[in-house]
Image (cartoon, rainbow, N blue to C red):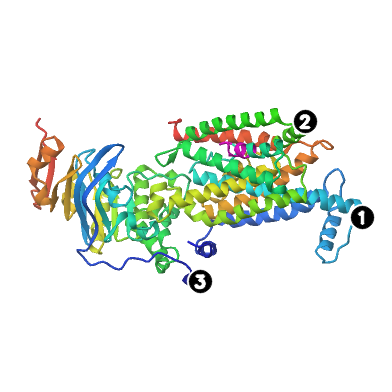
Amino acid sequence: MKLLRSRPTPPPPSEPGDVLAEASGLHVRLGGREVLQGVDVFARAGEVLALVGPNGAGKSTLLGALAADLPAAAGVVRIHGRAADEWPAAELALRRAVLPQAASLAFPFGVDEVVRMGRAPWAGTEGEDEDDVAVAEAMGAAEVAGFAGRPFSALSGGERARVALARVLAQRAPLLLLDEPTAALDLRHQELVLRVCRERARAGDAVVVVLHDLGLAAAYAHRVAILSGGRVVADGAPEAVFEERLLSDVYRQPIEVFPHPRTGAVLISPVRDS
Amino acid sequence: MTLMDKVVEATEEASPARRVRGGGWLLTVGLVVALLVLVPVAAGLGAYPIPTGDVLGSVLHKVGLGGAELERVPESVLWNVRFPRIVLALLVGASLGCAGALMQGMFSNPLAEPSVIGVSAGAAVGAVGAISLGLNFLGTVTIPAVAFVTGLATVLLVYSMSRAGGRTEVVTLILTGIAVNAFAGALIGLFLFFADTAAVNQITFWQLGSLAQATWSKVLAVLPFAVVGLVVAPLYSRRLDLLSLGERPARHLGVDVERLRVVLILVIALLTAAAVGVSGIIGFVGLVIPHLLRMAAGPGHRFLVPGSALAGAVVLLAADLVARTIAAPAELPLGVLTALLGSPFFFWLLRRTRRRQGGWA
């Protein structure tokens, strides 16, 4: 019976370094305002790319454009080498997974059911056989297995955020787009989420993550793109782009960058003279 | 996607791997048993009582499995009065229950229901217009067909007016419903004003919501609408589940949201027209049924959509039985009965939703 259906084909495995998502000369308009003004950025397999910048810089808009949610006013977004607006929804769902900023649910589904929704794109493909494994693995990685049977609506904000993350992980798409995954989380789970990002990158996925915590970005991202006023003002390894003058300028707040006394890792802190 | 794909998908969705929560199966069995008991009971009860044994005998005789034909009068009462009414009650109840479940899923809002948001009234405008103008261009199918067209226009209107940024706020939805109900009421009043006395009587009676004038030709007139709606609806259960995450996340999971929306609007209009076209506005069935089922068996639409159709059929058959026997020989209009029971439930639901949200944003 499966031969009768025109099911989406899963993407071929990607090599480390393959560009899975890319924006070039991208302009995006929202409500008459040009939120992105000529952005060039790319996400490679095997790499965690952090998007940072002040509020309103266009981070979430860029992520939305890379997810094919927002149309380009000018320029182009390519996902797996093909223009974003040319992909049918079903094919795209096997190629990129998106974690929205806020997770909501209209009806009181159980946590396990919500995570299982992440497997929907695979229905009818060979990947369907991995459903149970993928769900269990994702729930383990996001540490939500402990409340698998509870209704989503009974969870705290941080727990909901992790369930949403588990759903996105269960989708097993090679391109992961995460919009502020750490916003609602405690210290332990912030570290956990970024470690998961690193693991996915090591396994060959491309991970793009919007972050506010520059320390997390410095510690976990392979590459950081700093956005300001709808443009990318710096793009490179954290040690290279996290520079006091640039950051102080972009955030309009004096910022100091210094090495960790023991490990030498980059630490970033606002200057607080007391 | 072709129809074949959908059928394949639907059968796979029913496979044990995609399990319905345990409560679902129990409920299904319970509802089917209730249906099997209720049908012969409803066929026997009434102004002219017929023993249940005779009812079964006559049915067996009709399908050629033994049994015995009844005398002329009871046989005629059974087959020309009771059975068309029972079948109509089942069709209307299934359509209302199913339409309610679909609507709540489509709006991602537990307060959506054809009568609450004005879609039933919109379909009623078409039906009343057809009656008062004496339209008959499609024979007996005319009234449900016209009701379908005006119902469809109303769903489109409500949907486009009550959504903002991919979401439906409760307040906007209910207020839109009030506006649409008021406008539809005015149009119905206008048709009444211009109709002749016979048509006025027919309309007034019909407006209260009743199955009293059930005939086989009416059953045949709404059958295609109800059947198409009821067969297509469950094919979209899984996508409705995903839609509860929000439109964007649903799209991220491969749902063609625009197309889903078009199909759902069409199916809802079909089901509403099937119900309103023959029985007037019978409110709250589509609100109460999906809610009770969601509480009992969880929110998964794979059970909820067909389950609401089944439960709607059972409940409306029972309600009609009560409506025509409780004040015998007089008959209580069915719409009055369901509104009497359904409105307090709606009230409770409003309070609960408000408490949960901490106010109406």
From the top left corner, tell me how far across and down residue A191 is, in percent.
24, 51
Q: What residue type is labelled 1?
A: Glu
Q: Residue A96: where, in percent of width, then height?
A: 32, 57
Tell me which amino acid carries mark 2. Answer: Thr
Report which residue position mark 1 lands on.
Answer: B71
Q: Name the residue under label 3.
A: A1
Vertical side of A93 occupied by B132: above or below = above
Instruction: Name the foreground residue: B28 vs B340.
Output: B340
Please rate how many residues cluster around mark 3, counting C-alpha atoms within 10 Å: few if below 14, some from 14 to 19, many from 20. few
> How far apart in space, not on screen, are marks 3 and 2 (Cα)?
59 Å
Name the subunit of mark 3: A
Q: How far apart are marks 3 and 1 (CA)?
A: 52 Å
The disc placed on residue B197 is 2
**Which quadrant of the view contains residue A257?**
top left
Check whether the beta carbons of the residues at disc 2 and disc 1 lie within 8 A of each other.
no
> For the residue carrying disc 1, how many other residues have a C-alpha within 10 Å: few (<14), some (14-19), or many (20+)?
few
| Labels 2 and 1 share a subunit | yes
Extent of the magenta region: B116-124
